Protein backbone atom coordinates (compact mmCIF):
# COMPACT_ATOMS: atom_id res chain seq x y z
CA UNK A 1 0.00 0.00 0.00
CA UNK A 2 3.06 2.21 0.33
CA UNK A 3 3.33 2.83 -3.41
CA UNK A 4 -0.31 3.85 -3.61
CA UNK A 5 0.21 6.15 -0.69
CA UNK A 6 3.15 7.70 -2.50
CA UNK A 7 1.19 8.14 -5.71
CA UNK A 8 -1.70 9.57 -3.87
CA UNK A 9 0.72 11.77 -2.09
CA UNK A 10 1.06 13.24 -5.43
CA UNK A 11 -2.52 14.23 -5.44
CA UNK A 12 -2.44 15.37 -1.91
CA UNK A 13 0.33 17.64 -2.83
CA UNK A 14 -2.05 19.01 -5.33
CA UNK A 15 -3.08 21.24 -2.54
CA UNK A 16 0.40 22.17 -2.10
CA UNK A 17 -0.94 25.52 -1.63
CA UNK A 18 -2.11 25.11 1.90
CA UNK A 19 -1.03 26.68 5.01
CA UNK A 20 1.71 25.62 7.23
CA UNK A 21 2.04 26.91 10.69
CA UNK A 22 5.25 26.82 12.63
CA UNK A 23 5.20 24.04 15.11
CA UNK A 24 5.65 24.92 18.69
CA UNK A 25 8.12 22.76 20.59
CA UNK A 26 6.79 20.45 23.26
CA UNK A 27 8.14 21.90 26.52
CA UNK A 28 8.67 18.35 27.73
CA UNK A 29 10.82 17.43 24.75
CA UNK A 30 13.75 19.16 23.07
CA UNK A 31 12.45 18.40 19.60
CA UNK A 32 8.92 19.45 20.33
CA UNK A 33 6.93 17.31 17.93
CA UNK A 34 3.47 17.77 19.37
CA UNK A 35 1.51 20.98 19.21
CA UNK A 36 -1.70 22.54 18.06
CA UNK A 37 -3.53 25.78 18.53
CA UNK A 38 -6.20 25.81 21.16
CA UNK A 39 -8.78 28.31 19.87
CA UNK A 40 -9.94 31.03 22.15
CA UNK A 41 -6.85 31.23 24.34
CA UNK A 42 -4.56 34.22 24.44
CA UNK A 43 -1.36 32.20 24.58
CA UNK A 44 -0.11 29.30 22.53
CA UNK A 45 -0.91 26.00 24.13
CA UNK A 46 0.55 22.56 23.57
CA UNK A 47 -1.84 19.64 23.13
CA UNK A 48 -1.46 16.05 22.05
CA UNK A 49 -1.61 16.05 18.22
CA UNK A 50 -3.64 12.84 18.37
CA UNK A 51 -6.33 14.62 20.40
CA UNK A 52 -8.32 15.95 17.45
CA UNK A 53 -10.51 18.94 18.17
CA UNK A 54 -12.42 21.55 16.23
CA UNK A 55 -10.15 24.54 15.65
CA UNK A 56 -11.12 28.00 14.49
CA UNK A 57 -9.10 31.15 13.93
CA UNK A 58 -10.20 34.77 13.89
CA UNK A 59 -8.53 35.66 10.61
CA UNK A 60 -9.43 32.89 8.13
CA UNK A 61 -13.10 33.51 7.38
CA UNK A 62 -12.25 35.27 4.10
CA UNK A 63 -9.38 32.96 3.18
CA UNK A 64 -9.75 30.66 0.16
CA UNK A 65 -8.01 27.99 2.27
CA UNK A 66 -10.40 28.27 5.24
CA UNK A 67 -11.53 24.64 5.11
CA UNK A 68 -8.02 23.28 4.61
CA UNK A 69 -6.68 25.29 7.53
CA UNK A 70 -9.36 23.98 9.86
CA UNK A 71 -8.75 20.37 8.81
CA UNK A 72 -5.00 20.38 9.35
CA UNK A 73 -5.33 22.31 12.60
CA UNK A 74 -7.81 19.72 13.83
CA UNK A 75 -5.26 17.01 13.07
CA UNK A 76 -2.62 18.87 15.05
CA UNK A 77 -0.40 19.62 12.06
CA UNK A 78 -0.53 23.41 12.33
CA UNK A 79 -1.13 25.96 15.03
CA UNK A 80 -1.88 29.62 15.35
CA UNK A 81 -1.04 32.32 17.80
CA UNK A 82 -3.51 34.10 20.05
CA UNK A 83 -6.44 32.91 18.00
CA UNK A 84 -5.00 33.85 14.61
CA UNK A 85 -3.54 31.72 11.84
CA UNK A 86 -1.96 34.49 9.73
CA UNK A 87 -2.75 32.80 6.38
CA UNK A 88 -0.78 35.33 4.31
CA UNK A 89 2.41 35.03 6.34
CA UNK A 90 5.39 33.58 4.44
CA UNK A 91 6.63 30.09 5.40
CA UNK A 92 10.29 29.50 6.24
CA UNK A 93 12.39 26.55 5.14
CA UNK A 94 12.41 25.15 8.66
CA UNK A 95 8.65 25.51 9.04
CA UNK A 96 8.03 23.57 5.84
CA UNK A 97 10.48 20.81 6.77
CA UNK A 98 8.91 20.56 10.21
CA UNK A 99 5.44 20.12 8.78
CA UNK A 100 6.47 17.56 6.18
CA UNK A 101 8.36 15.50 8.75
CA UNK A 102 5.44 15.65 11.16
CA UNK A 103 3.11 14.32 8.51
CA UNK A 104 5.55 11.49 7.71
CA UNK A 105 5.92 10.73 11.41
CA UNK A 106 2.16 10.74 11.95
CA UNK A 107 1.75 8.35 9.04
CA UNK A 108 4.44 5.99 10.36
CA UNK A 109 6.77 6.43 7.39
CA UNK A 110 9.49 7.63 9.72
CA UNK A 111 10.04 7.67 13.48
CA UNK A 112 10.96 11.14 14.64
CA UNK A 113 12.23 9.76 17.95
CA UNK A 114 14.92 7.85 16.08
CA UNK A 115 16.36 10.89 14.30
CA UNK A 116 20.08 11.07 15.16
CA UNK A 117 20.87 14.73 15.71
CA UNK A 118 24.49 13.94 16.62
CA UNK A 119 25.30 12.75 13.07
CA UNK A 120 24.96 16.22 11.52
CA UNK A 121 26.26 19.74 12.00
CA UNK A 122 23.06 21.49 13.02
CA UNK A 123 24.47 24.40 15.03
CA UNK A 124 22.62 27.00 12.97
CA UNK A 125 19.30 25.17 13.40
CA UNK A 126 17.22 26.22 16.42
CA UNK A 127 17.24 23.53 19.09
CA UNK A 128 13.54 22.73 18.71
CA UNK A 129 13.96 22.11 14.98
CA UNK A 130 17.11 20.01 14.95
CA UNK A 131 15.44 16.60 15.11
CA UNK A 132 13.11 17.57 12.27
CA UNK A 133 16.03 18.53 10.04
CA UNK A 134 17.93 15.37 11.02
CA UNK A 135 14.87 13.26 10.20
CA UNK A 136 14.48 15.08 6.86
CA UNK A 137 18.09 14.25 5.96
CA UNK A 138 17.68 10.60 6.93
CA UNK A 139 14.45 10.32 4.92
CA UNK A 140 16.02 12.00 1.90
CA UNK A 141 14.07 15.25 1.80
CA UNK A 142 17.29 17.20 2.42
CA UNK A 143 20.60 15.88 1.09
CA UNK A 144 23.51 15.85 3.59
CA UNK A 145 25.56 18.19 1.42
CA UNK A 146 22.76 20.76 1.45
CA UNK A 147 22.96 21.35 5.19
CA UNK A 148 25.75 23.88 4.72
CA UNK A 149 23.48 26.14 2.67
CA UNK A 150 20.18 25.36 4.42
CA UNK A 151 18.88 28.61 5.89
CA UNK A 152 16.17 27.76 8.47
CA UNK A 153 14.79 31.31 8.66
CA UNK A 154 14.67 32.04 4.95
CA UNK A 155 11.31 32.05 3.20
CA UNK A 156 10.76 28.77 1.34
CA UNK A 157 10.41 29.38 -2.40
CA UNK A 158 8.00 27.45 -4.57
CA UNK A 159 10.82 25.83 -6.52
CA UNK A 160 12.33 24.54 -3.29
CA UNK A 161 8.94 23.24 -2.17
CA UNK A 162 8.64 21.34 -5.45
CA UNK A 163 12.10 19.82 -4.90
CA UNK A 164 11.24 18.58 -1.39
CA UNK A 165 7.91 17.20 -2.56
CA UNK A 166 9.49 15.38 -5.51
CA UNK A 167 11.96 13.73 -3.14
CA UNK A 168 9.14 12.54 -0.92
CA UNK A 169 7.50 11.03 -3.97
CA UNK A 170 10.57 8.88 -4.39
CA UNK A 171 12.53 7.57 -7.34
CA UNK A 172 9.83 5.37 -8.87
CA UNK A 173 8.60 8.11 -11.17
CA UNK A 174 11.63 10.38 -10.89
CA UNK A 175 13.24 9.60 -14.24
CA UNK A 176 10.13 8.72 -16.18
CA UNK A 177 9.17 11.13 -18.93
CA UNK A 178 6.01 9.26 -19.94
CA UNK A 179 3.12 10.02 -17.54
CA UNK A 180 1.23 6.92 -18.65
CA UNK A 181 4.11 4.69 -17.63
CA UNK A 182 3.70 5.93 -14.06
CA UNK A 183 0.48 3.94 -13.74
CA UNK A 184 1.23 0.80 -11.75
CA UNK A 185 -1.85 -1.38 -12.08
CA UNK A 186 0.02 -4.27 -10.46
CA UNK A 187 0.34 -2.24 -7.27
CA UNK A 188 -3.35 -1.37 -7.33
CA UNK A 189 -4.17 -5.03 -7.88
CA UNK A 190 -2.14 -5.96 -4.81
CA UNK A 191 -4.10 -3.47 -2.72
CA UNK A 192 -7.40 -4.80 -4.00
CA UNK A 193 -6.11 -8.23 -3.01
CA UNK A 194 -5.51 -6.91 0.51
CA UNK A 195 -9.15 -5.81 0.71
CA UNK A 196 -10.28 -9.25 -0.45
CA UNK A 197 -8.07 -10.91 2.17
CA UNK A 198 -9.56 -8.81 4.97
CA UNK A 199 -13.10 -9.68 3.92
CA UNK A 200 -12.28 -13.38 3.52
CA UNK A 201 -10.73 -13.49 6.99
CA UNK A 202 -13.82 -12.14 8.71
CA UNK A 203 -15.26 -14.44 11.31
CA UNK A 204 -18.59 -15.98 10.38
CA UNK A 205 -21.32 -13.44 11.15
CA UNK A 206 -23.74 -16.16 12.20
CA UNK A 207 -27.25 -17.09 11.12
CA UNK A 208 -28.75 -13.85 12.41
CA UNK A 209 -26.64 -11.91 9.93
CA UNK A 210 -26.82 -14.30 7.00
CA UNK A 211 -27.90 -11.53 4.62
CA UNK A 212 -24.86 -9.42 5.51
CA UNK A 213 -22.61 -12.44 5.00
CA UNK A 214 -24.18 -12.99 1.58
CA UNK A 215 -23.44 -9.36 0.69
CA UNK A 216 -19.83 -9.78 1.78
CA UNK A 217 -19.46 -12.93 -0.30
CA UNK A 218 -20.92 -11.16 -3.33
CA UNK A 219 -18.59 -8.19 -2.78
CA UNK A 220 -15.57 -10.51 -2.65
CA UNK A 221 -16.55 -12.03 -6.00
CA UNK A 222 -16.93 -8.58 -7.54
CA UNK A 223 -13.56 -7.47 -6.17
CA UNK A 224 -11.93 -10.56 -7.65
CA UNK A 225 -13.48 -9.71 -11.03
CA UNK A 226 -12.21 -6.13 -10.70
CA UNK A 227 -8.75 -7.39 -9.84
CA UNK A 228 -8.77 -9.54 -12.97
CA UNK A 229 -9.61 -6.49 -15.11
CA UNK A 230 -6.51 -4.70 -13.84
CA UNK A 231 -4.22 -7.22 -15.56
CA UNK A 232 -4.81 -5.76 -19.01
CA UNK A 233 -5.80 -2.22 -18.02
CA UNK A 234 -4.29 0.95 -19.45
CA UNK A 235 -4.89 4.66 -19.00
CA UNK A 236 -7.87 4.57 -21.37
CA UNK A 237 -9.66 2.31 -18.87
CA UNK A 238 -9.23 4.62 -15.88
CA UNK A 239 -12.61 6.37 -16.09
CA UNK A 240 -14.49 3.06 -16.12
CA UNK A 241 -12.27 1.61 -13.39
CA UNK A 242 -12.84 4.63 -11.17
CA UNK A 243 -16.62 4.51 -11.63
CA UNK A 244 -16.79 0.76 -11.03
CA UNK A 245 -14.55 0.81 -7.99
CA UNK A 246 -16.60 3.65 -6.53
CA UNK A 247 -19.61 1.32 -6.74
CA UNK A 248 -17.63 -1.41 -4.97
CA UNK A 249 -16.63 1.04 -2.24
CA UNK A 250 -20.28 2.04 -1.86
CA UNK A 251 -21.22 -1.63 -1.52
CA UNK A 252 -18.65 -1.96 1.25
CA UNK A 253 -20.12 1.11 2.96
CA UNK A 254 -23.54 -0.56 2.83
CA UNK A 255 -22.11 -3.70 4.44
CA UNK A 256 -20.58 -1.59 7.22
CA UNK A 257 -23.86 0.28 7.78
CA UNK A 258 -25.81 -2.99 7.91
CA UNK A 259 -23.31 -4.50 10.35
CA UNK A 260 -23.47 -1.41 12.58
CA UNK A 261 -27.27 -1.50 12.46
CA UNK A 262 -27.24 -5.20 13.36
CA UNK A 263 -24.89 -4.45 16.27
CA UNK A 264 -22.27 -6.84 14.93
CA UNK A 265 -19.23 -7.68 17.04
CA UNK A 266 -16.78 -4.77 17.37
CA UNK A 267 -13.95 -6.90 15.95
CA UNK A 268 -15.99 -7.46 12.78
CA UNK A 269 -16.73 -3.73 12.47
CA UNK A 270 -13.02 -2.99 12.92
CA UNK A 271 -12.09 -5.42 10.15
CA UNK A 272 -14.70 -3.93 7.84
CA UNK A 273 -13.37 -0.47 8.62
CA UNK A 274 -9.84 -1.61 7.75
CA UNK A 275 -11.12 -2.86 4.41
CA UNK A 276 -12.88 0.46 3.81
CA UNK A 277 -9.68 2.40 4.54
CA UNK A 278 -7.81 0.36 1.95
CA UNK A 279 -10.66 0.82 -0.51
CA UNK A 280 -10.48 4.59 0.01
CA UNK A 281 -6.75 4.52 -0.74
CA UNK A 282 -7.29 2.54 -3.94
CA UNK A 283 -10.10 4.87 -5.07
CA UNK A 284 -8.00 7.95 -4.54
CA UNK A 285 -4.91 6.40 -6.15
CA UNK A 286 -6.92 5.65 -9.29
CA UNK A 287 -8.11 9.25 -9.34
CA UNK A 288 -4.51 10.45 -9.02
CA UNK A 289 -3.55 8.45 -12.09
CA UNK A 290 -6.47 9.89 -14.02
CA UNK A 291 -5.41 13.41 -13.11
CA UNK A 292 -1.84 12.99 -14.36
CA UNK A 293 -1.17 16.02 -16.53
CA UNK A 294 0.73 15.22 -19.73
CA UNK A 295 1.43 18.95 -20.15
CA UNK A 296 4.11 19.60 -17.55
CA UNK A 297 5.09 23.05 -18.83
CA UNK A 298 4.53 26.54 -17.43
CA UNK A 299 4.47 29.93 -19.11
CA UNK A 300 7.58 30.90 -17.16
CA UNK A 301 9.59 27.70 -17.72
CA UNK A 302 12.59 29.82 -18.72
CA UNK A 303 12.62 31.36 -15.24
CA UNK A 304 12.81 28.04 -13.40
CA UNK A 305 16.36 27.32 -12.15
CA UNK A 306 17.89 24.12 -13.53
CA UNK A 307 18.04 22.57 -10.06
CA UNK A 308 14.23 22.76 -9.80
CA UNK A 309 13.18 22.01 -13.39
CA UNK A 310 12.58 18.27 -13.01
CA UNK A 311 10.82 18.63 -9.65
CA UNK A 312 8.54 21.37 -10.98
CA UNK A 313 7.57 19.18 -13.93
CA UNK A 314 6.84 16.33 -11.55
CA UNK A 315 4.54 18.31 -9.26
CA UNK A 316 2.74 19.75 -12.30
CA UNK A 317 2.36 16.30 -13.84
CA UNK A 318 0.67 15.00 -10.74
CA UNK A 319 -1.26 18.26 -10.31
CA UNK A 320 0.33 18.94 -6.97
CA UNK A 321 1.34 22.48 -7.87
CA UNK A 322 -0.52 23.76 -10.87
CA UNK A 323 0.68 27.33 -11.06
CA UNK A 324 -0.99 30.72 -11.03
CA UNK A 325 -4.02 31.86 -13.02
CA UNK A 326 -1.69 33.21 -15.69
CA UNK A 327 -0.07 29.81 -16.21
CA UNK A 328 3.15 30.71 -14.41
CA UNK A 329 4.81 28.63 -11.72
CA UNK A 330 6.59 31.55 -10.03
CA UNK A 331 9.49 29.41 -8.73
CA UNK A 332 11.11 32.19 -6.73
CA UNK A 333 7.98 33.28 -4.89
CA UNK A 334 7.86 32.38 -1.20
CA UNK A 335 4.92 30.15 -0.23
CA UNK A 336 2.42 31.35 2.35
CA UNK A 337 0.79 29.63 5.25
CA UNK A 338 -2.56 29.26 3.49
CA UNK A 339 -0.82 27.49 0.59
CA UNK A 340 1.02 25.07 2.83
CA UNK A 341 -2.15 24.32 4.75
CA UNK A 342 -3.73 23.10 1.57
CA UNK A 343 -0.68 21.01 0.85
CA UNK A 344 -0.77 19.37 4.27
CA UNK A 345 -4.45 18.64 3.95
CA UNK A 346 -4.01 16.89 0.62
CA UNK A 347 -0.89 15.19 1.87
CA UNK A 348 -2.58 13.59 4.85
CA UNK A 349 -5.84 12.88 3.03
CA UNK A 350 -4.51 11.45 -0.19
CA UNK A 351 -0.93 10.49 0.34
CA UNK A 352 -0.18 9.54 3.89
CA UNK A 353 -3.08 7.18 4.43
CA UNK A 354 -5.35 9.32 6.58
CA UNK A 355 -8.32 7.26 5.44
CA UNK A 356 -9.68 6.13 8.78
CA UNK A 357 -13.22 4.91 8.20
CA UNK A 358 -15.67 4.15 10.97
CA UNK A 359 -19.41 4.14 11.65
CA UNK A 360 -21.91 5.38 14.18
CA UNK A 361 -25.58 4.84 14.93
CA UNK A 362 -28.02 7.31 16.43
CA UNK A 363 -31.10 9.48 16.02
CA UNK A 364 -30.99 12.14 13.33
CA UNK A 365 -31.34 15.39 15.24
CA UNK A 366 -30.61 18.03 12.60
CA UNK A 367 -29.88 17.96 8.89
CA UNK A 368 -29.15 20.41 6.09
CA UNK A 369 -27.19 20.32 2.84
CA UNK A 370 -23.90 20.93 4.66
CA UNK A 371 -24.07 18.42 7.50
CA UNK A 372 -26.02 16.38 10.01
CA UNK A 373 -26.10 15.94 13.77
CA UNK A 374 -27.07 12.68 15.44
CA UNK A 375 -27.58 11.68 19.06
CA UNK A 376 -25.91 8.33 19.71
CA UNK A 377 -26.83 5.66 22.25
CA UNK A 378 -24.82 7.42 24.96
CA UNK A 379 -26.85 10.60 24.40
CA UNK A 380 -23.78 12.24 22.85
CA UNK A 381 -24.07 14.68 19.96
CA UNK A 382 -22.09 13.77 16.85
CA UNK A 383 -21.76 16.02 13.80
CA UNK A 384 -20.80 14.95 10.27
CA UNK A 385 -20.13 16.84 7.04
CA UNK A 386 -22.13 16.36 3.85
CA UNK A 387 -19.94 16.29 0.72
CA UNK A 388 -20.60 15.83 -2.98
CA UNK A 389 -19.83 12.12 -2.51
CA UNK A 390 -22.25 11.56 0.40
CA UNK A 391 -24.95 8.96 -0.31
CA UNK A 392 -28.23 8.70 1.59
CA UNK A 393 -30.39 5.58 1.47
CA UNK A 394 -33.67 4.46 3.00
CA UNK A 395 -34.94 0.93 2.52
CA UNK A 396 -32.26 0.44 -0.17
CA UNK A 397 -33.54 3.43 -2.15
CA UNK A 398 -31.59 6.65 -2.75
CA UNK A 399 -32.69 9.77 -0.89
CA UNK A 400 -31.88 13.32 -2.04
CA UNK A 401 -29.65 15.26 0.31
CA UNK A 402 -32.13 18.14 0.39
CA UNK A 403 -34.77 15.74 1.72
CA UNK A 404 -32.72 14.61 4.71
CA UNK A 405 -34.43 17.07 7.06
CA UNK A 406 -37.66 15.15 6.48
CA UNK A 407 -36.14 12.23 8.36
CA UNK A 408 -35.24 14.07 11.56
CA UNK A 409 -36.17 11.79 14.45
CA UNK A 410 -35.35 8.66 12.47
CA UNK A 411 -32.60 6.27 13.46
CA UNK A 412 -29.60 6.44 11.09
CA UNK A 413 -26.24 4.78 10.58
CA UNK A 414 -23.40 6.99 9.34
CA UNK A 415 -20.21 5.71 7.71
CA UNK A 416 -17.61 8.48 7.93
CA UNK A 417 -13.89 9.19 7.63
CA UNK A 418 -11.16 10.82 9.70
CA UNK A 419 -12.42 14.30 8.76
CA UNK A 420 -16.00 13.46 9.82
CA UNK A 421 -17.08 13.51 6.17
CA UNK A 422 -20.04 11.18 5.78
CA UNK A 423 -19.70 8.80 2.83
CA UNK A 424 -22.95 6.92 3.49
CA UNK A 425 -26.00 7.73 5.60
CA UNK A 426 -28.37 4.82 5.96
CA UNK A 427 -31.78 5.78 7.33
CA UNK A 428 -32.82 2.82 9.44
CA UNK A 429 -36.20 4.18 10.46
CA UNK A 430 -37.96 5.27 13.62
CA UNK A 431 -39.86 2.62 15.54
CA UNK A 432 -42.74 5.01 16.18
CA UNK A 433 -42.91 6.14 12.58
CA UNK A 434 -42.62 2.61 11.27
CA UNK A 435 -45.43 1.45 13.57
CA UNK A 436 -47.67 4.23 12.28
CA UNK A 437 -46.83 3.31 8.71
CA UNK A 438 -47.65 -0.34 9.39
CA UNK A 439 -51.00 0.63 10.90
CA UNK A 440 -51.81 2.81 7.88
CA UNK A 441 -50.92 -0.06 5.56
CA UNK A 442 -53.19 -2.44 7.49
CA UNK A 443 -56.08 0.07 7.43
CA UNK A 444 -55.61 0.53 3.74
CA UNK A 445 -56.07 -3.22 3.27
CA UNK A 446 -59.33 -3.44 5.26
Image: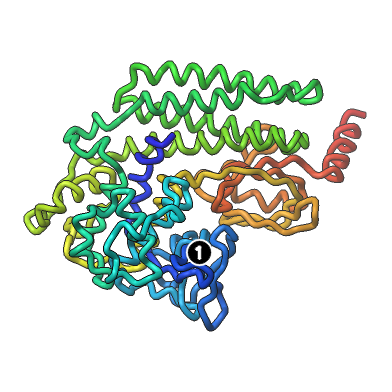
- As displayed, is residue 339 above or below residue 288? below
Q: Residue at x 42, y 45 (%)?
A: 109
**Within the image, what quadrant is residue 68 found in?**
bottom left
Q: Residue at x 63, y 33 (%)?
A: 272
Q: Nearer the viewer, residue 23 or 435?
A: 23
Q: Is residue 155 left or right of residue 207?
A: left
Q: Is residue 160 left or right of residue 213?
A: left
Q: Is residue 172 left or right of residue 203?
A: left
| Residue annotated with mark 1 | 34
- As displayed, is residue 296 above or below residue 35? above
Which element carries disc 1, helix, strand or loop?
loop
Q: Residue furthest right?
A: 446
Dot 1: within a 10 Å radius of its alpha carbon, few (fewer than 14), some, or many (20 or more) residues? many
Q: Residue furthest bottom?
A: 42
- Where does residue 33 sit, x and y in percent of width and height? 47, 63
Q: Nearer the viewer, residue 69 or 246?
A: 69
- Where does residue 82 sit, x and y in percent of width and height? 49, 81
Q: Residue at x 34, y 60 (%)?
A: 118
Q: Residue at x 31, y 47 (%)?
A: 168
Quadrant holding the N terminus: top left
Amino acid sequence: MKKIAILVLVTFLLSLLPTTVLAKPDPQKAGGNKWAQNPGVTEQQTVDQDDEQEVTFDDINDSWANGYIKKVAKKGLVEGYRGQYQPNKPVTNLELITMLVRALDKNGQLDLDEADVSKYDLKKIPLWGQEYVAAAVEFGIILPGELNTFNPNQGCKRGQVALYVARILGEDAENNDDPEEDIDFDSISEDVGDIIAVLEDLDDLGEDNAEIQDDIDALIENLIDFQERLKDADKADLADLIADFKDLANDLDDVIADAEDAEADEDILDELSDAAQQASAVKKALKVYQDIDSDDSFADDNQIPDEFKFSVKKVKRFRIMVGDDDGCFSPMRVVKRDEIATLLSRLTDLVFGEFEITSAKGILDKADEDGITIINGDEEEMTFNITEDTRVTYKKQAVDIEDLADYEGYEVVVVYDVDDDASTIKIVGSAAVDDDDDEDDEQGQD
